[in-house]
Amino acid sequence: MGQDFYRDRIPGTPRFREKDKKKPIGSEPFWPNFLLKEWIVGALFLVAFTIWIIFNPVHLSDVADPNPSGYIPMPDWYFLFLYQLLKYFPGKMVWMGTVVIPGIAVTLLILAPWLDNSKARHPFKRPVATTSMILTLLLMIWMTYEADVQHEEALAHLPKQVDKSAMPTDTALVDEADPGAKIYSASCAGCHGADLKGSVGPFLLGIGNKHDAAKLEEVITKGFPPNMPAGGGLTKPEDIKAVAEWLGKQKQQ
């Protein structure tokens, strides 16, 4: 009977007896049974990912600017957990987050077949491997989420970009030897630009067409939170008045 059983065996299947059918190990050939299942799972994932991309297209952002006023670098989403890891090792300890911890993780992944050589396939029969993988996956998801949330919070606190669409094409810088011009260059140009074209703060080209000196003095005195403090960095009332009067003369030609 044993010979008949082996004779009727389908080519490519392992040699096992009838009593061994219930054993999970060796009961399924790698080719084509197991490999076919892997292909099916991979194909389903690829189709689902393609459909998700179709209905959630990735839009292009602004044209690259080599001189941004408030740019925060951000890696692609699949590296966000490593990006977040670096935040826990600042300064001289950055090598822990860039070399040591990732190196240990990669080494353990390479040694996994030797560290856990159990032949059982059911996750519950391999508690160490299953628990380690679940915890690692949850940690990566949490760190990715934290990196994205903290990045959005950092962007929310950045000064608004200068709106150049409403910027006048030309303006007359009236009497740059004026005391107000000198004070502006020393205290205000860092945010509003030496040519009034803006930087961290908004542009002031043609500001004299919109507000008179009295209104400008009021704005400088009260400030413009959250980016511009009261006084705009000027402590003396006479300096604020001099700058306001000079700005009031800056009119579009």
Image (tube, helix red, strand yellow):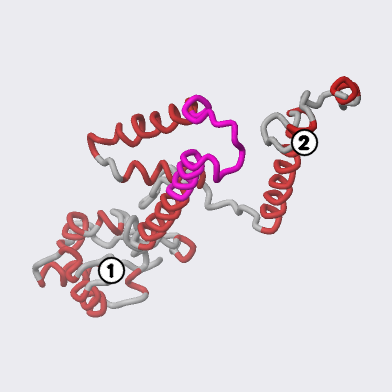
Give the residue pinned by disc 1. Answer: 226
- Image-based side of 175 in relation to 17, left or right: left
Residue 35 seen in render:
no
Depth check: 175 or 189 in front?
Answer: 189
Depth check: 79 or 140 in front?
Answer: 140
The residue that appears at 87% across and 25% down in the rendered structure is 5
Circle 2 residues within 10 Å: few <14, some 14–19, many ≥20:
few
Please determine whether, in this image, residue 19 is positioned above or below residue 88.
above
The residue that appears at 44% across and 30% down in the rendered structure is 108
Please determine whether, in this image, residue 25 is positioned above or below residue 176.
above
Circle 1 residues within 10 Å: few <14, some 14–19, many ≥20:
few
Label 2 or label 1, whichever comes before in sequence order = 2
Image quadrant occupied by the N terminus: top right
Q: Amino acid at mark 2?
A: Leu
The percent coordinates of residue 196 (x first, y second) are 32, 59
Q: Which residues are magenta?
A: 112-139
Labelled disc at residue 36: 2
